[in-house]
Image: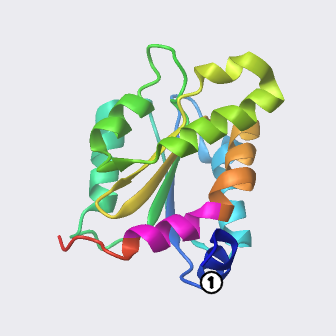
Amino acid sequence: MGHLEHKKDIKAGKLLAVYVITLSDTRKESEDESGSYIKERLLSASHKVSGYSIIKDDGELLENLIVKICSPDSKLKTDALIVNGGTGISFKDITYETLKDLYDKEIYGFGELFRSLSYNEIGPSAIMSRASAGIYNGKIIFSVPGSLNAVKLAMDKIIIDEIGHIYYEISKHLPII
């Protein structure tokens, strides 16, 4: 089966429950345009938002939240997480370091494709993005920059089109935990 036929079969598959996390030391929910956009796009694609949190740019807070959400004992039914913020190169940007140590498998192509698409919009500054994706405890995690334009790019050009396909692939042979 070719990739187009394969994806067509998957589109009729499971709608996912996705948890949205915004990293910000200053943002409140009423000001979180990026988090709001992620939630709106998920809902418009008939996925469910299983939860939403704004947390400070703190690796320990982020790791603890993700471990809790992805725990086999969690009562929260979540298939994927989208984290926005903290992917830059400043000292306080900790998302990449936190997630790379959690991933069971990293999906390298996501970051590469995101930076390539970003380059088309913002030029060589795209190299400073450390967007990433991976699998942890059978859950998909996407990590994108916190700017609204970056979130729109990630959601509209990559995540909405591929999240179901990725879930299908990883759920075929999930390890029993």
Outermost residue to the top = 91
Range of magenta residues: 162-170
The residue pinned by badge 1 equals 9
Residue 60: image location, x then y, percent:
28, 35
Q: Is residue 163 magenta?
A: yes
Q: As displayed, is residue 130 above or below residue 43?
A: above
The answer to whether 51 is drawn above or below residue 57 in the figure is below
Q: Which residue is at a point 61% across and 62% down the rendered structure image?
A: 162
Query: Dividing the image into 4 quarters, which one contains the C terminus?
Result: bottom left
Which residue is located at x 73 percent, y 39 percent? 148
Q: Name the spot of residue 134 as percent of width and height, x first.
A: 42, 49
Number of labelled discs?
Answer: 1
Front residue of 9 and 98: 9
Residue 177 showing in the rendered view: yes
Prevalent SS, magenta region: helix
Callout 1: 10 Å neighbours few (<14), some, many (20+)?
few
In the drawing, does residue 104 fall left or right of residue 129? left
Above or below, comparing residue 45 to residue 90 in the picture: below
- Name the amino acid, label 1: Asp
